[in-house]
Image (spheres, helix red, strand yellow):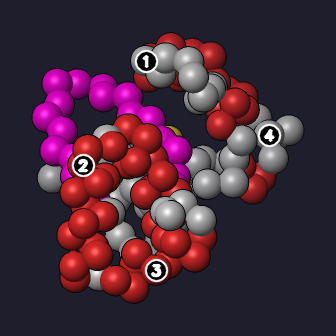
């Protein structure tokens, strides 16, 4: 696992908006030495994790990451929406990627989480 702090510019680590995601083996060939080099900014350096059987890895919200499996692996992943992170950014992505779901979700929040709807309106991401 390579987990990068949210402040790293994505293009510096080969995660370029609008381009297909490169596979991890290619990433390690092209970027691994770069991100560990002495001249790579310290505040952008990744956390490198070697996960062994039985371990769980938690990836914090907003941390770009990639995984290279060294042997046959089964992955169980779960993404969740939390009001305690960059909720407005997450909402914008859901609204762009899944507009029908976003409309239903907004209806549900209007019914039971009016504070979150108000927060979205205040930030300008919902009318």
As drawn, is 80 to the left or to the right of 67?
Answer: left
As drawn, is 45 to the left or to the right of 122?
Answer: right
Residue ID at (69%, 30%) = 11
The residue beneath circle 2 is 101
Compared to residue 107, the image places residue 41 above or below, namely above
**Label 4 crowding class (10 Å Cα cut-off): few <14, some 14-19, many 20+?**
few
Q: Residue furthest bottom?
A: 115
The residue beneath circle 1 is 23
Inter-mark Cα distance, 1 to 4? 22 Å
- Disc 3 element: helix
Residue ID at (45%, 47%) = 93
Inter-mark Cα distance, 3 to 1? 40 Å
Q: Which mark is residue 40?
A: 4
Upstream in the sequence, badge 1 or badge 2? 1
**Which residues fall within the magenta stretch?**
62-80
> Would residue 18 be seen by someone viewing this image from the given angle?
yes
Upstream in the sequence, badge 2 or badge 3? 2
């Amino acid at each position: 696992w390579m987990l990068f702090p949210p402040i790293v510019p994505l293009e510096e680590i080969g995660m370029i908006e609008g381009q297909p995601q490169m596979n991890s083996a290619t990433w390690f060939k092209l970027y691994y030495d770069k991100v560990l080099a002495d001249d790579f900014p310290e505040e952008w350096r990744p956390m490198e994790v070697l996960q062994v059987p039985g371990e769980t890895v938690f990836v914090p919200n907003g941390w770009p990451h990639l995984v290279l499996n060294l042997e046959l692996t089964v992955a169980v992943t779960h993404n969740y929406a939390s009001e305690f992170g960059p909720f407005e950014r997450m909402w914008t992505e859901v609204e762009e990627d899944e507009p029908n779901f976003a409309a239903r979700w907004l209806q549900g929040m209007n019914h039971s989480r009016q504070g979150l709807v108000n927060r979205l309106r205040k930030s300008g991401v919902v009318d």
